[in-house]
């Protein structure tokens, strides 16, 4: 029995989480896979009951779980409060040592018409961005005065080595090409990054390592997105490049992500926010949450057959023209979910899965 902590979170989080768990239950019912779900308050949902955004009980449950699913984080009610929902996510990443953020960028035929990039350029896009998540300029020493401020960008060897190894490990199951993105012409941290990347690459002789400056890589993602396989980069660059790449499919609603530590539990979540403006309207796109479940099955549980079954059903539903409003369709969250379940055999709806 695999124990999954469920952090539905804020806004549309509970809706898309319910959809994904219904799909998982329906698919798992066909092959005997067994899961238990442990819902816990998190983010704005935890603040609403008078707790911190990461309650101690929630953290303990996460530490004892086999995997964590997160719906969405963020609630405008708490923007000026002493604690914000987002602080809960940062605290969770730190407590679990989640140093590697994995974002697959895939453009399926069903969403080609939505991409702001020409179909001839974007068709067939399928790459992964591996972002270092717990160091760099976001976590370095900071100061802010009236007329001067600074943020120190700091990286240690061990932090670079482990994220580079993560990228090569992923590449070994793909096209075996790793692009390391840096700014080595001006940044000392990037020169260290590049040197260590070359050292780690020797451990993976079946893979190819290349380097590119971040500004050049940003342009190429828009001009030639099909040229990439695995991109690995530091925290700030990864934040920017992954958000840039997310526009390729035309909607944030179809992109999942995973965050891994050296050991222990991993976290799976959509890359989009909580979208409070559409919460409760039954129009949220659940694809990113469903595909986050697919990543969990593959990367935490090594359940490739079950993962492929759900992924295939999800993409087939989209290719059949059953799309939510953000993808130019008129399907509700419930209708899309039901259509995916029907493609899975429809033997179990899994409503009220938790």
Image (cartoon, rainbow, N blue to C red):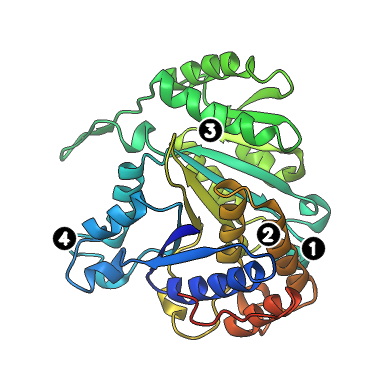
CA gap, disc 4 and disc 2:
43 Å
Reading the image, the residue beneath label 3 is 233
Whether residues under marks 3 and 1 lie with C-beta atoms below 8 angstroms apart, the answer is: no
N-term mark: 4 or 3: 4
Reading the image, the residue beneath label 1 is 109
In depth, the one of 94 and 198 nearer the eye is 94
The percent position of residue 172, horizontal first and vertical second, equals 70, 32
* Lateral position of residue 218 relative to residue 52, left or right: right
Whether residues under marks 4 and 2 lie with C-beta atoms below 8 angstroms apart, the answer is: no
In the displayed image of the protein, which residue is found farthest to the right? Answer: 120
N-term mark: 3 or 2: 3
Reading the image, the residue beneath label 4 is 82
Q: Quadrant of residue 317?
A: bottom right
Q: Residues within 10 Å of mark 2 (few under 14, many from 20)?
A: some
- Residue at left 43%, top 74%? 14
CA gap, disc 3 and disc 2:
31 Å
Instruction: Give the secondary structure at mark 4.
Output: loop
Disc assigned to residue 269: none
Reading the image, the residue beneath label 2 is 306
Instruction: Give the secondary structure at mark 1.
Output: helix
Q: Is any atom of residue 216 visible in this view?
A: no
- Quarter of the image for the C terminus: give it: bottom left
The percent position of residue 183, horizontal first and vertical second, equals 52, 25
The percent position of residue 60, horizontal first and vertical second, equals 28, 53
CA gap, disc 2 and disc 1:
22 Å
Whether residues under marks 1 and 4 lie with C-beta atoms below 8 angstroms apart, the answer is: no
Instruction: Give the secondary structure at mark 2.
Output: helix
- Residue at left 45%, top 51%? 66
């Amino acid at each position: 029995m695999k124990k999954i902590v469920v952090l539905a979170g804020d806004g549309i989080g509970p809706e898309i989480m319910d959809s994904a768990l219904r799909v998982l239950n329906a698919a798992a019912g066909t092959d005997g896979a067994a899961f238990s779900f442990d819902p816990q308050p998190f983010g704005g949902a935890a603040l609403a009951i008078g707790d911190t955004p990461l309650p101690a009980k929630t953290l303990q449950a996460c530490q004892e779980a086999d995997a964590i699913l997160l719906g969405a984080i963020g609630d405008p009610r708490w923007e000026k409060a002493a604690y914000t929902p987002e602080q809960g996510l940062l605290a969770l990443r730190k407590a679990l040592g989640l140093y590697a953020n994995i974002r697959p960028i895939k453009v399926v035929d069903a969403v080609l018409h939505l991409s702001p990039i020409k179909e001839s350029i974007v068709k067939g896009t399928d790459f992964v961005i591996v972002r270092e998540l717990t160091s760099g300029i976001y976590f370095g020493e900071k100061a802010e005065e009236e007329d001067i401020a600074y943020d120190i960008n700091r990286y240690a060897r061990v932090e670079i080595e482990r994220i580079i190894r993560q990228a090569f490990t992923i590449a070994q199951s793909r096209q075996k090409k790793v692009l390391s993105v840096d700014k080595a012409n001006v940044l000392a941290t990037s020169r260290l990054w590049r040197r260590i990347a070359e050292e780690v690459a020797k451990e993976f002789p079946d893979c190819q390592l290349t380097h590119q400056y971040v500004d050049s890589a940003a342009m190429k993602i828009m001009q030639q997105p099909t040229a990439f396989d695995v991109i690995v980069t530091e925290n700030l660059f990864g934040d920017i490049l992954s958000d840039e790449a997310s526009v390729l499919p035309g909607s944030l609603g179809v992109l999942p992500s995973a965050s891994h530590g050296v050991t222990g539990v991993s976290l799976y979540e959509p890359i989009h926010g909580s979208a409070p403006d559409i919460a409760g309207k039954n129009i949220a796109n659940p694809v990113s949450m469903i595909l986050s479940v697919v990543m969990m099955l593959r990367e935490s549980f090594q359940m490739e057959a079950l993962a492929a079954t759900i992924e295939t059903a999800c993409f087939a539903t989209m290719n059949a023209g059953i799309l939510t409003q953000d993808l130019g369709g008129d399907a509700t969250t419930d209708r899309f979910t039901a259509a995916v379940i029907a493609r899975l055999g429809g033997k179990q709806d899994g409503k009220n899965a938790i």
